[in-house]
Amino acid sequence: MSKTKRTLPLFPIVFTAVMVAASVILCRFLGFSPSNSTVRFDLGFLPLAVVGELYGFPYSGIGYLLADIIGSLLHGYAPNPYISACKLLTGIIMGVGFHKKKVTLLRSFVVFTINAVIVGVGLMPPIFIFMYAYEPGFAYATRAINAAVTIPVRVFTFYFLWKACGKMLTEMKERQQNFTNKKKNKSSADFSAYANSFQAVTIPGLSRIKALLDALGNPENSLRFIHIAGTNGKGSVAADIASILTAAGYRVGKYTSPNLLRVNERISVASEDIPDGALDALLERIRPLADKIREEGGIPPTQFEIWTAAAFVYFKEESCDYVVLEVGLGGEFDATNVIPQNEIAVITRLGMDHMQYLGNTLSDIARAKCGILKTDSATHRLITPAQEPEAMAVIRAACEEKGIALTVPAPVSEGAEGYLERFSVGKYQHLLTGIPGYHQIENAALAVMACDALGIGEDAIRQGIAAAKNPARFEILRENPTVIYDGGHNENGIRALTASLDRYFPGEKKSVIFACMADKATDVSLSLLSEGTEAFFFTEVKDNPRALHAEDLAARAAALGISGTVCKNVGDAYEAAVAAGRLTVICGSLYLYEDLMHYFEKTKKR
């Protein structure tokens, strides 16, 4: 039996070494002590706190120990083993306190206060007492004063450093981990595994995708795109438009994300997902080009960029008449925005999501989404719903700047047929949605007006809207009791879900199965869902590094006064909820859908 060769994690070691050097400089050469020596100001802790956040306590602990030893030697005296042990413990506390946790002012205060109490006030005074003959009371008072003065300095400097640089440092770590460490063997099998593995977020920027498409002969230049950005509803609008264009007789390519069950779902032509053989062949073509880009620029194409390039090649080779193109993240710097022109642009409902990448206001988010507007557009038109005023102002200004005509549909609801909706918009009367949910009126209206601007006939619009499908969006999984899966994962999505529940199940008590990603805000969503909910079941998405653990989710809910049952997998949650015989709603993340379908397949039941 062959042995697996183990290698040291080189990048974290090198990064820690650099931070140790920075710590020595900040502590030993840039530190400041007043004449009475009661308080010492230095920022030597700062680089090691960053190490603790990124790589955890083994690195931050050993790093702080080495920083103390090296600093002592540079000053010409032997390290004090007791002080060095205190530095080791300080590094460990920072690693435990910060690693894989969101940096907030409160967390920073708690971590540095714990360290000051245990190390600064608890362990350091004996050095003054036994080595320098300080009176015990004076020694402890001195360290307490030092802690009281330096804790705020440490809290605010680390917090604001992380606010300024944390995103960049985290992306650096993710790029290194996702490609350099995991993909040292450049075989096609490894590359295929990389391209199909989970990636937390895309990395904004167009240089890598441009280089990749240049090497592939720029297939995007010969395609006609309907480009869709927004926070909520992109997938449904894409499904509606693709269905209408198909009904009109066009060969339609569709590019969406994320997938539900198989990555092949992201690329489809004529409603058929890309076959495994075609996908493997595309990845084999792209692999050496991606390797070359990595070698020349130091940063490899991301998985989303690889998929975007593969989709464009496939759509060209399949002679697509139109490509319905969904933005991955944002708009302006999203890989899909490499296209030089579009037929028409659509921006769906905007909300507060992915703020760490797009900005903390609706204006910032709208500005990022408007990046898809092109002066070189076949229709010179943008379709968007009536957004919040601050977002609408940005959209109108962007349209005026680029000479884009703005269409804001005003659909009129005409009542429900089961879980589907009748509505009219513009000159189109009495249309029926194909995707269930009250909020689908708005999405369908966007699709109708976009296709109207493209010159599509009324029969195709009517037929296509009714035939559209988009799984995991208010999908009815069973009746008696009714079980609904909805991919709502932010405030807007949950508001749309609860509006549909109020419409189709007025006054009915329900059970809620909830799971989400750790980087999602949950307070408003949980509060909205709590209305009329008899029981919550908190679960988690399997094998997803972004997933929030069920226990942590339950703790968030408990802080809002919401109690529930913790279930480590969605199957247990499903069984418990359905056994109660109530309306059951499963929501919080699209990623949970795959786990649920695997459970159904394994148990052969719904």
Image (spheres, grey):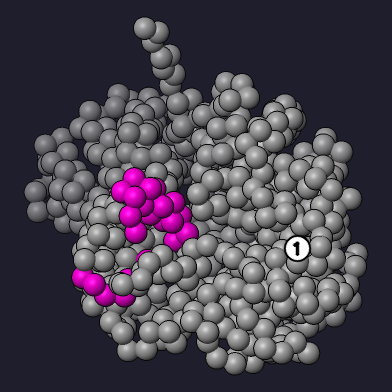
Q: Quadrant of residue 4?
A: top left
Question: Is residue 466 visible to the viewer in this orientation of the structure?
Answer: yes
Task: Confirm whether the magenta stretch covers residue 601.
Answer: yes
Count residues near mark 1 (Cα–Cα under 10 Å), then give few for <14, some for 14-19, many for 20+: many
> Seen from this angle, which residue lies furthest top?
1
Quarter of the picture holding the C terminus: bottom left
Quarter of the picture holding the N terminus: top left
Q: Quadrant of residue 532?
A: bottom left
Closest to the observer, 592 or 31:
592
Residue 195: horizontal and vertical position, in percent?
A: 60, 37
Element carrying mark 1: helix
- Give the answer, above or below, for where 475 lies relative to 314: below
- Give the answer, above or below, for where 449 lies relative to 292: below
Closest to the observer, 46 or 210:
210
Identified at 40% across, 69% down, the residue is 484
Task: Name the kind of residue labelled 1 in the image.
Answer: Thr
* Range shown magenta: 580-606
> In the shown orientation, is residue 53 left or right of residue 170?
left
Identified at 47% across, 37% down, the residue is 19
Residue 512: horizontal and vertical position, in percent?
A: 31, 70
Residue 404: horizontal and vertical position, in percent?
A: 86, 76
Q: Quadrant of residue 96?
A: top left
- Give the answer, above or below, for where 411 lies relative to 560: below
Instruction: Quickly name the residue at label 1.
Output: 246
